[in-house]
Image (tube, grey):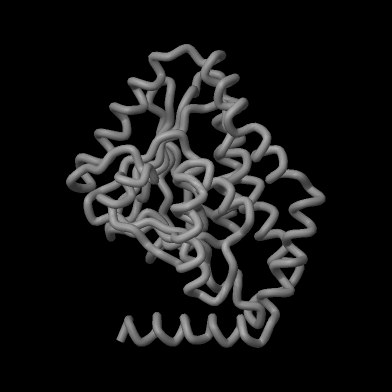
């Protein structure tokens, strides 16, 4: 892959790494980005010097990630084969991240819908800027929220809150996200964000790894194993492709494209 296609940049800080995500204009997550995220996580987990990772946006605009690239979900613009690969790679990464032996921190700048929210709640700790928003809002696009994403959110904020956020595509602002436990801290701006995320990381790394890793696996191991199961991934990819191929879903996504195009004018 050529340098211009790299969306992930890694900077090491002694015993932890900063992973910057940058795909202009809004970090929409296509197949290549998910592949690079999985590649990066695997590499960091295999590096004995690295014990933690901070994920943050490398964009100048206030966006952590806008979630999945709609071109990967719009059936006429892709193929079943590509979508199945997209589904498997993205969910393999998320499952792995959710139970990674590394300490994981999400530094969330601004907008963080859908896939960005799932990636963030798969991390151990989340810091968000005051202008940040989060939510699994797939229903607003005419598609369903992936089942394991729902389970992950419910494990963090509870079934009742997850029910309302996912069914009704609700996006919450930073203050509410903190109140319901979707994030752990709110900071004023981007400059403070990364500084605070690194301070949090340094504090968490004062704990020895073995006990924390075993405890994390007790909390998340069962879901992560179920999530990464190849039979489940294949079955869910097939189910999701059928939904994306429905005329009603295609029409709903075309409506989203039209609104986005109008907003740019």
* Residue at 48% over, 45% down: 158
Pick out the residue farthest to the left. Answer: 188
Give x and y (percent) for residue 188. Answer: 18, 46
Quadrant for the N terminus in the image: bottom right
Q: Is residue 199 above or below residue 189?
A: above
Quarter holding residue 93: top right
Q: Is residue 96 above or below residue 102?
A: below
* Residue at 41% over, 19% down: 205
Quadrant for the C terminus in the image: bottom left
Pick out the residue farthest to the front. Answer: 160
* Residue at 74% over, 67% down: 239
* Of 35 and 98, the residue lying toward us: 98
Quarter holding residue 199: top left
Give x and y (percent) for residue 144. Answer: 59, 67
* Of 148 and 161, the residue lying toward us: 161
Pick out the residue farthest to the right. Answer: 231
* Of 230 and 162, the residue lying toward us: 162
């Amino acid at each position: 892959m050529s340098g211009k296609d790299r969306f992930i940049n890694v900077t090491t800080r002694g015993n932890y790494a900063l992973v910057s995500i940058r795909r202009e204009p809004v970090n929409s997550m296509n197949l290549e980005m998910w592949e690079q995220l999985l590649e990066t996580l695997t590499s960091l987990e295999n590096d004995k010097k690295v014990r933690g990772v901070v994920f943050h946006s490398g964009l100048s605009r206030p966006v952590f990630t806008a979630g999945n690239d709609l071109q990967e979900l719009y059936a006429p613009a892709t193929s079943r084969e590509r979508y199945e690969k997209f589904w498997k790679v993205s969910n393999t990464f998320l499952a792995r991240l959710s139970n990674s032996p590394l300490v994981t921190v999400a530094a969330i700048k601004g907008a963080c819908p859908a896939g960005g929210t799932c990636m963030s709640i798969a991390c151990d700790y989340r810091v968000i800027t005051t202008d940040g928003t989060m939510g699994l809002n797939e229903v607003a696009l005419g598609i369903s929220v992936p089942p394991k994403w729902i389970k992950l959110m419910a494990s963090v904020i509870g079934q009742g809150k997850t029910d309302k956020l996912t069914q009704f595509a609700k996006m919450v602002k930073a203050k509410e996200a903190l109140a319901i436990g979707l994030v752990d801290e709110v900071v004023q701006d981007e400059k403070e964000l990364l500084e605070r995320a690194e301070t949090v990381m340094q504090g968490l790394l004062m704990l020895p790894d073995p006990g924390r890793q075993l405890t994390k696996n007790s909390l998340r191991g069962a879901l992560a194993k179920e999530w990464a199961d190849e039979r489940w991934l294949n079955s869910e990819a097939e189910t999701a492709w059928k939904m994306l191929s429905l005329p009603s879903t295609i029409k709903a996504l075309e409506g989203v494209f039209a609104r986005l195009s109008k907003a740019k004018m």
